[in-house]
Amino acid sequence: MSWETWSFAFSVTVPNLLMMLLGILLRHCRLMDDRFIDGATKLVFNLALPCLLFFSIATNHPQLRDNFALVIYGAVGTIATFLLLEIAAKWLVKEPRERGVFVQGGFRANTAIVGLAYAMTAYGDEGVAIASLYLTVTVILFNVLSVITLTRSLQGGNGQKIKHLSLLRSIVTNPLILGLLSGLAYAQTGLGIAPVLKQTGSYISGLSLPLALLCTGASLDLRAMFRSSNVAALSSSAKLFLVPVLMTLGGWLCGFEGATLGIIFMFSATPTASGSYVMTRAMGGNATLAANIIAITTVGSFFTTALGISFLRSWGVI
């Protein structure tokens, strides 16, 4: 395996690891506590991440007709892996309230941040152009399906009957979904954004990833991670191995190749999105479990991404 392959995975993955390690250090030094983490998490979930998603889509002006087959495949593949993990959760996860965290950790990829970084690093502007609508439809589905699985498991875990109206309300009022849909709607108008608004949006958006990663690191329970909750291990295994293999193999069988197949693999091979921790904590789920899944997949994805790229390049399909 070439040094360039390792260097590529290293340059994208390690900064995320370092930010989480900084969060652990700040918590140890008592510069971050539960009160700060709660406030920062709400800020990221309700403002910074929605703003990031809005501006990343609104400024790209993606056109559906140019990537229709890829968009359809991304939607079908995401729903299929979600349903597969929903079925598996009933058999593998004993605690009902943790099933939603297991499912979200296994299928929800960090396409909005790490995925775009992969696409830009590997294919430049062509990669970003190909990835933009694939990113849009998958991130919308990630957020909608995450709200569904978390709401179902949290309500079901309390022995309550799931209220479909409450579930629908959770979806349509989710700040991340609102940010995505608003960005997509604005992008279709073809209008520009005033420089002063774009700069302000850039400042707010810039808070999202570093603050989410710091809070994730500060919330890690390292002892729990290393004695290993089998739920975290199983969810991480699905994210690192099962989902990328299924998505890439399915894409190849559907006739995708080159940069398009490369983006399918890279997007599915990204670690679990840091937004999964933010959403889990905001909805009252097991945030420590979510944080441990993010940590395991962030470390593991460095190796699985590099190995996958090397294998697919040696086969000449990307």
Image (spheres, grey):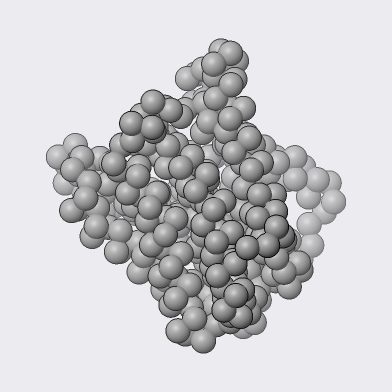
Residue 281: image x %, image y %?
42, 34
Residue lying furthest front in this view? Answer: 1
Which quadrant of the figure has residue 86?
bottom left
Q: Give the vertical position of 79 relative to 298 (above or below).
A: below
Residue lying furthest top in this view? Answer: 30
- In the image, 301: left or right of 100? right
| Residue appearing at x 35%, y 42% in the figure | 232
Q: Give the vertical position of 211 relative to 177 (above or below).
A: above
| Residue appearing at x 39%, y 26% in the figure | 223
Q: Give the vertical position of 135 relative to 207 (above or below).
A: below
Residue nearer the viewer, 282 or 26: 26
Look at the image and tell me whether residue 180 can be seen.
no
| Residue appearing at x 14%, y 40% in the figure | 159
Residue 212: image x %, image y %?
57, 36
Residue nearer the viewer, 166 or 297: 297
Quadrant position of the C terminus in the picture: bottom right
Q: Give the vertical position of 265 relative to 210 (above or below).
A: below
Quadrant position of the N terminus in the picture: bottom right
- In the image, 110: left or right of 183? left
